[in-house]
Image (cartoon, coloured by chain):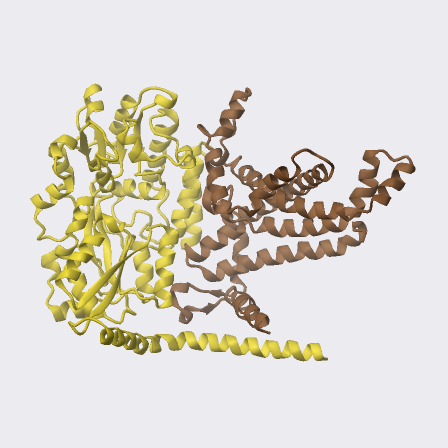
Chain colours: A brown, B yellow
């Protein structure tokens, strides 16, 4: 019961209030007296707002790249570590480390690594003969990819652990049977490992997509949405409209759009899982 | 059925909580006074022999060690009955949000300093600032005599703030490099001359590169410097037209971005902004290690130039006024102006005491801050003393004193904005489009056009 009260006060009430606020034009400095209902205006206005549309595009692109990349990489890492390798635990620790590190610290360190003229990444790239290495955070074409790289790097560890658990759960018997039937390593990977892992993949997919829409810290610390609007994402833009532009109503409306998008995607996945998830 | 009941119950509970929550909020303003006075009374009961000690909290953004701590100590020593505590917030977006949240939540903030007029106006509109007219009348404080007739912009006919300082805008130049290149200390110049100087003062490549020009103290900013530059030409409310639409089709805006683009990309005399930001360059550090020849920033740099312990250097700094857009630019004080807008929180419990402190602070009280370059706006401050405090102990070793006096004590008219419609969003638009220009992804003409379109959409 105390749990429910806590959840109600700290989560449900703010959520309901934000829905109410999203139908208003409210500068939070004015206090409750400044609350003015404007119906659906916020939800209509946003589609002609460059920043909102750009944020939405960036978010979708971000999800489309980071989610598959994280899943493939973490699966590969898990399979590699599941078989016998030397230094198993140090490697596992190394891959998992970024996930438990503070994202603010990570962003600052990567900001230095990405330095276009003096950073280690570009020094390395030019030393292997790339004449014109990317400008990373200083270029609007490369800033979003730079943030994608960090996000993937930081999330592989967590998903790898989930996959490792999934792999441990697959019975040896299945592989034995496959070998007797004449399946090579590749066939048994695609016919045994992948299907048996599908519930794990389903879980990882859903959480990764939700996570990818919540990207904020890296953007806030490293780029502030720039250059131009190239790294502006919904979470960051709605923070800005709320606290820099004092438009709480508009900000809440965008947060609700974000919620609806995530909800829809998750809903579709639950519908689609029957086709490919084998329990 | 049971489930339904529980959900229903929960819903009712939620509603009740919402109502209670809102109700509380409203009542708070009323209750707060009695609570606070109660706690004040109890603290006096427990405390000092002197009897009625009032404790004030004073929020400002200048780091404590650069003067405010000394100022507050001076006051506390002389006024045992009103003890002031300085609380520092960082003057950036999140720092200002922190201050505003504290004001909203009813934390103790008795006085606070505003560093941007548009933010101050927002706070006044939200009723967070106490009008001072009654206090001024009661205490017989002569604002005009102390600060001049044009120091304060009245808002809906009321006085809400007093500016404690004048912040000076100027260009600091490395005199050794000027002499090497046979260039004079400019007494008045246009951006064309500035670009000329920058090109001539740029030398070397790669790690040994010396940049001719740098803007800002640490990493360059777009909006603030555009604002300073166009004001020399356009005067107050440069971003707006008479009819309320935005002013970005005025050639001054395109001109500024052309100048910056030229400096960064064509002349390569100034670090490209995106790179400076990405690599966290520090302009003042570069200037004091001979890697930058001219720095356009103003007051803020003085503190570092005088700090020869952390930044040892052996050249003399000369001063030039900020460049003009065109030969006939009239508002030379475009970037110079009143600042440190000191205000009293309208929800403070100790407004009388706060006003007492404020009268002192905006006049003689902020003397410890002068060394950091914050020239008091108080008319009665002794100019020679101010100059010697600003320049420090060995002015001749560090500064070209003649050009300093010429620039800092120039008799120029300051520009005071009165219109701040959607300014935060306009700033974000300028930064968005401006970055595209300076990276080289958008032509200045197109960028200025987009600024106009996007800003007009907001303002209509």
Is A41 or B110 nearer to us in this picture? B110
State whether residue B17 is above or below residue B85. below
Q: Is residue A226 visible?
A: no
Q: Is residue A86 left or right of residue B404?
A: right
From this viewpoint, which residue is outermost toward the right? A181
Q: Which quadrant holds residue A190?
A: top right
Q: Is residue B104 left or right of residue A151?
A: left
Quadrant position of the C terminus of chain B in the picture: bottom left
Q: Position of residue B39 (x, y in %)?
A: 29, 75
Q: Is residue A242 left or right of residue B138?
A: right
Is B156 or B9 nearer to us in this picture? B9
Name the residue rendered at 12%, 35% in the picture. B394
Q: Which quadrant holds residue B205?
A: top left
Name the residue rendered at 14%, 60% in the picture. B77
Q: Position of residue A92 (x, y in %)?
A: 63, 40
Q: Which quadrant holds residue B353?
A: bottom left
Is B138 or B286 nearer to us in this picture? B286
Name the residue rendered at 8%, 53% in the picture. B380
Q: How many marks?
A: 0
Q: Is residue B203 left or right of residue A89?
A: left
Name the residue rendered at 12%, 62% in the picture. B78
Q: Position of residue A105 (x, y in %)?
A: 47, 44
Quadrant position of the N terminus of chain B in the picture: bottom right
State whether residue B105 is above or below residue B4. above
Q: Is residue A157 visible?
A: yes
Q: Position of residue B19 (x, y in %)?
A: 49, 77
Is B60 or B435 nearer to us in this picture? B60
């Amino acid at each position: 019961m105390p749990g429910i009260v806590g959840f109600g006060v700290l989560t449900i009430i703010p959520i309901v209030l934000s829905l109410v606020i999203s139908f208003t034009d409210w500068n939070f400095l004015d206090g409750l007296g400044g609350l003015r209902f404007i119906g659906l205006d916020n939800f209509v206005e946003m589609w002609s707002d460059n920043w909102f549309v750009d944020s939405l595009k960036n978010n979708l692109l971000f999800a489309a790249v980071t989610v598959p990349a994280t899943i493939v990489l973490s699966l590969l890492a898990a399979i590699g570590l599941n078989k016998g390798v030397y230094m198993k635990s140090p490697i596992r620790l190394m891959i998992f480390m970024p996930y438990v590190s503070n994202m603010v610290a990570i962003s600052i360190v990567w900001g230095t690594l990405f330095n276009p003229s003096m950073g280690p990444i570009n020094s390395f790239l030019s030393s292997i003969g790339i004449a014109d290495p990317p400008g990373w955070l200083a270029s609007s074409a490369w800033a979003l990819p730079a943030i994608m790289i960090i996000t993937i790097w930081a999330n592989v560890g967590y998903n790898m652990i989930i996959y490792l658990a999934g792999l441990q759960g697959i019975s040896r018997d299945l592989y034995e049977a496959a070998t007797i039937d004449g399946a090579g390593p590749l066939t048994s990977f695609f016919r045994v490992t992948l299907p048996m892992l599908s519930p794990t993949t389903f879980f990882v997919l859903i959480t990764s997509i939700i996570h990818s829409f919540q990207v904020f810290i890296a953007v806030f610390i490293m780029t502030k949405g720039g250059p131009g609007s190239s790294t502006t994402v919904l979470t960051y833009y709605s923070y800005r409209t709320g606290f820099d532009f004092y438009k709480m109503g508009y900000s809440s409306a965008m947060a609700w759009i974000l919620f609806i998008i995530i909800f829809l995607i998750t809903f579709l996945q639950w519908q689609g899982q029957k086709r490919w998830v084998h329990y | 059925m049971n489930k339904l009941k529980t959900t229903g119950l929960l819903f009712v509970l939620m509603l009740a909580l919402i109502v209670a929550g809102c109700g509380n909020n409203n009542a708070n303003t009323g209750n707060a006074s009695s609570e606070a006075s109660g706690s004040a009374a109890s603290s006096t009961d427990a405390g000092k022999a002197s009897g009625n000690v009032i404790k004030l909290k004073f929020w400002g953004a200048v780091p404590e060690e650069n003067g405010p701590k000394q100022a507050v100590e001076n006051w506390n020593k002389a006024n045992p009955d009103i003890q002031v505590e300085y609380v520092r917030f960082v003057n950036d977006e999140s720092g200002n949000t922190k201050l505003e949240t504290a004001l909203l939540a009813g934390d103790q903030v008795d006085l606070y300093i505003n560093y941007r007029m548009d933010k101050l106006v927002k706070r006044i509109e939200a009723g967070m600032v106490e009008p001072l007219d009654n206090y001024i009348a009661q205490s017989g404080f002569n604002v005009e005599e102390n600060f001049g007739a044009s120091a304060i912009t009245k808002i809906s006919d009321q006085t809400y703030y007093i500016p404690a300082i004048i912040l000076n805008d100027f260009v600091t130049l490395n005199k050794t490099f000027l002499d090497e290149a046979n260039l004079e200390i400019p007494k008045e110049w246009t951006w064309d001359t500035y670009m000329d100087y920058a090109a001539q003062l740029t030398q070397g490549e790669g790690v040994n590169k010396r940049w001719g020009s740098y803007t800002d103290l640490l990493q360059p900013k777009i909006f603030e410097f555009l604002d300073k530059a166009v004001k020399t030409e356009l005067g107050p409310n440069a971003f707006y037209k008479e009819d309320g639409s935005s002013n970005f089709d005025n050639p001054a805006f395109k001109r500024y971005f052309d100048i910056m683009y030229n400096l960064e990309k064509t002349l390569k005399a100034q670090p490209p902004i995106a790179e400076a930001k990405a690599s966290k360059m520090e302009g003042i550090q570069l200037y004091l290690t001979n890697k930058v020849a001219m720095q356009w920033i103003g007051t803020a740099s003085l503190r570092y130039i005088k700090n020869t312990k952390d930044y040892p250097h052996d050249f003399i700094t000369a001063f030039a006024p900020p460049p003009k857009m065109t030969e006939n630019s009239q508002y030379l004080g475009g970037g110079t102006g009143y600042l440190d807008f000191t205000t009293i929180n309208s929800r403070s419990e100790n407004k009388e005491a706060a006003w007492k402190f404020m009268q002192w602070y905006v006049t003689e009280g902020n003397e410890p801050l002068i060394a950091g370059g914050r020239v008091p706006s108080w008319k009665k401050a002794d100019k020679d003393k101010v100059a010697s405090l600003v320049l420090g102990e060995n002015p001749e070793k560090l500064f070209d004193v003649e050009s300093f006096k010429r620039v800092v004590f120039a008799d120029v008219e300051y520009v005071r904005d009165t219109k701040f419609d959607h300014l935060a969003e306009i700033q974000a638009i300028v930064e968005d489009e401006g970055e595209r220009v300076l990276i080289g992804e958008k032509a200045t003409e197109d960028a200025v056009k987009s600024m106009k379109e996007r800003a007009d959409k907001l303002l209509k």
